[in-house]
Image (cartoon, helix red, strand yellow):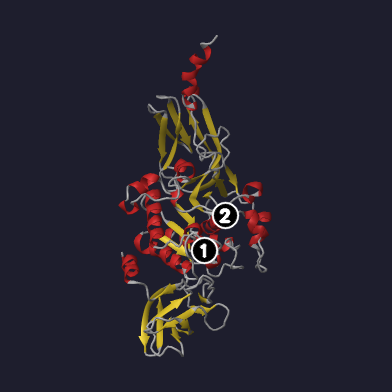
């Protein structure tokens, strides 16, 4: 009698897939999913060692056998977009039939609470009346079978799901708890591209950037000596790694508040570089675009019991650290959100439909080569000093410089040789902005939106805000941005 548990122990120690000698799929492979068009599409899972596995989809068939560790993988050749649902069949000892699988565009959206911010919250946010169709009533209208969503649960993604039901049409209860920025990003892409779009949301409120980076990526970089804190890999392991190698077009990222509270600057720039390069390496695709959100205005300096001293310039310095990534990492893009705030004491500004649509505009312009889509507002290019006046030139943009509300430009300050910045008068002259102040006879530097509460009115005529800047960056910051 006492021997029976001892006999069972070796059997119980085997992986579930091997013990049952059945094909098992990762949770991200499920009914209703979207497969990435025009790229090789990996299909993978586990089975008994040596078990033969066949994958069939839309007239193509791939065969393999599970390796000694039970893992198997096949790769379907690139396919054109297809909005008609089809069955993807995986056959081993058992047969798995995934229904209603589409082919189109797939993106992964990640970050902290502002990316996690749900459609339900978005529908209840207090904002001024919106033009029709009101994005706040999108939950009532949403019913587009060409738009599919997958919400990552950090406690479940690494576990197989025998029901294969992780993907949903973007509607009803599934959409209520889904990321609003991710949904509006995907909706805009689907509308403009006219192909199925699948979007994955994997976000954790309050998370710093470090847990989203594999610990090995930190260990491989001498920059992080001594080792970085912040639980490296804590969310990467359960919420990103199990998605690899699901074929994607690219990434969207909305994170930084938790690191800004620590008054980070260049260290955050480096961490973003590490995150982007490590994610691209995980997918074995250095071309994957990475688009992200510059944080919105917020009174960080009024935080109670901060871990680091915070001032009204803490956020602008963080903006600068976010922007520095653009100069050092190819195929990246940033959107500005200085206008998307209702209350400066709310770390979760409500205009998530604008966040999603601006990210989509970046993707449409840069990834899908839709050059008619305006992707960025005014971005500082150069400073020219002319006696009592400073002239600011901006990179070429679609449209022209405008004051959004028709009032005198706001957010500009100017300093002379003493380095003391004072409020400045600024006006648009063609493609430039002329800046001056009566108290500064000979300006030497200009700053724009260089305050945590700044919500300036300089925009492009396409409706996009100007990016904050300062012309007096320290030499170290200038050389870092030039790399």
Question: Could you tell which of marks 1 and 2 lies nearer the N-terminus?
Answer: 2
Specify the quadrant of the image occupied by residue 380.
bottom left
Residue 46 vs 81, above or below: the answer is above
Q: In screen coordinates, is 200 left or right of 284?
A: right
* Quadrant housing the N terminus: top right
Q: Are marks 1 and 2 in contact (CB under 8 Å)?
A: no
x then y, percent, for residue 483: 31, 64
Residue at 57 percent across and 53 percent down: it is: 179
| On screen, residue 284 above or below 369 | above
Q: Does residue 40 appear anywhere in the picture?
A: yes
Callout 2: few (<14), some (14-19), or many (20+) C-alpha neighbours within 10 Å?
Answer: many
Front-lying residue, 160 or 438: 438
**How many C-alpha atoms fall within 10 Å of the one at disc 1: few (<14), some, or many (≥20)?**
many
232 in relation to 467, above or below: above
169 up-or-down from 289: above or below: above
Tell me the distance, in whole angstroms, between the alpha carbons under discs 1 and 2.
12 Å
Q: What residue is rendered at 62% in x and 54% in y?
A: 119
Residue carrying label 2 = 183
Q: Which mark is residue 205?
A: none
Mark 1, secondary structure of its residue: helix
Res. 331 visible in picture: no
Q: Which residue is mark 1?
A: 358
Q: Position of residue 384 (x, y in %)?
A: 36, 83
Foreground residue among 482 and 287: 482
Residue 350 relative to residue 92: left or right: right
Quarter holding residue 72 = top left
């Amino acid at each position: 009698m006492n021997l029976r548990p001892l006999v069972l122990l070796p059997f119980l120690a085997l992986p579930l897939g091997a013990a049952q000698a059945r094909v098992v799929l990762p949770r991200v492979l499920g009914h209703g999913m979207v497969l990435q068009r025009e790229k090789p599409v990996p299909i993978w899972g586990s089975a008994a060692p040596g078990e033969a596995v066949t994958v069939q989809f839309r007239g193509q068939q791939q065969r393999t056998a599970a390796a000694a560790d039970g893992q198997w993988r096949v790769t379907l050749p690139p396919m054109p977009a297809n909005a008609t649902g089809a069955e993807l069949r995986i056959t081993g000892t058992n047969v798995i039939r995934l229904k209603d699988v589409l082919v189109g565009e797939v993106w992964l959206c990640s970050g902290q609470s502002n990316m996690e911010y749900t459609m339900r919250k978005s529908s209840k946010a207090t904002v001024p009346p919106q033009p029709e169709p009101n994005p706040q009533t999108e939950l009532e209208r949403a019913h587009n079978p060409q738009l599919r969503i997958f919400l990552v649960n950090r406690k479940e993604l690494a576990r197989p799901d025998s029901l294969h039901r992780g993907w949903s049409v973007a509607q009803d209860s599934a959409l209520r708890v889904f990321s609003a920025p991710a949904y509006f990003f995907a909706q805009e892409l689907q509308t403009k591209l006219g192909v199925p779009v699948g979007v994955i949301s994997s976000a954790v409120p309050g998370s710093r950037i470090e847990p989203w980076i594999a610990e090995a990526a930190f260990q491989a970089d001498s920059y992080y000596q001594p080792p970085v804190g912040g639980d490296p890999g804590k969310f990467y392991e359960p919420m990103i790694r199990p998605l690899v190698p699901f074929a994607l077009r690219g990434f969207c990222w909305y994170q930084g508040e938790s690191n800004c509270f620590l008054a980070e600057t260049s260290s955050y720039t480096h961490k973003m570089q590490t995150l982007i390069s490590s994610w691209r390496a995980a997918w074995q695709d250095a071309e994957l675009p990475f688009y992200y959100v510059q944080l919105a205005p917020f009174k960080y300096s009024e935080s109670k019991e901060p871990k680091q001293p915070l001032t009204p310039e803490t956020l602008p310095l963080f903006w600068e650290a976010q922007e520095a990534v653009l100069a050092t990492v190819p195929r990246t893009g940033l959107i500005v959100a200085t206008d998307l705030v209702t209350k400066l004491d709310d770390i979760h500004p409500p205009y998530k439909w604008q966040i999603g649509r601006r990210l989509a505009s970046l993707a449409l312009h840069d990834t899908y080569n839709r050059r008619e889509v305006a992707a960025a507002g005014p971005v500082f290019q150069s400073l020219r000093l002319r006696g009592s006046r400073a002239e600011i030139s901006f990179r070429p943009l679609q449209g022209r410089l405008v004051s959004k509300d028709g009032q005198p430009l706001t957010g500009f300050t100017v300093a002379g040789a003493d380095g003391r910045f004072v409020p400045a008068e600024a006006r648009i002259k063609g493609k430039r902005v002329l800046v001056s102040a009566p108290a500064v006879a000979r300006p030497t530097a200009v700053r724009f939106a260089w305050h945590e509460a700044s919500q300036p009115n300089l925009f492009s005529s396409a409706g996009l805000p100007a990016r904050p800047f300062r012309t007096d960056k320290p030499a170290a910051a200038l050389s870092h941005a030039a790399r």
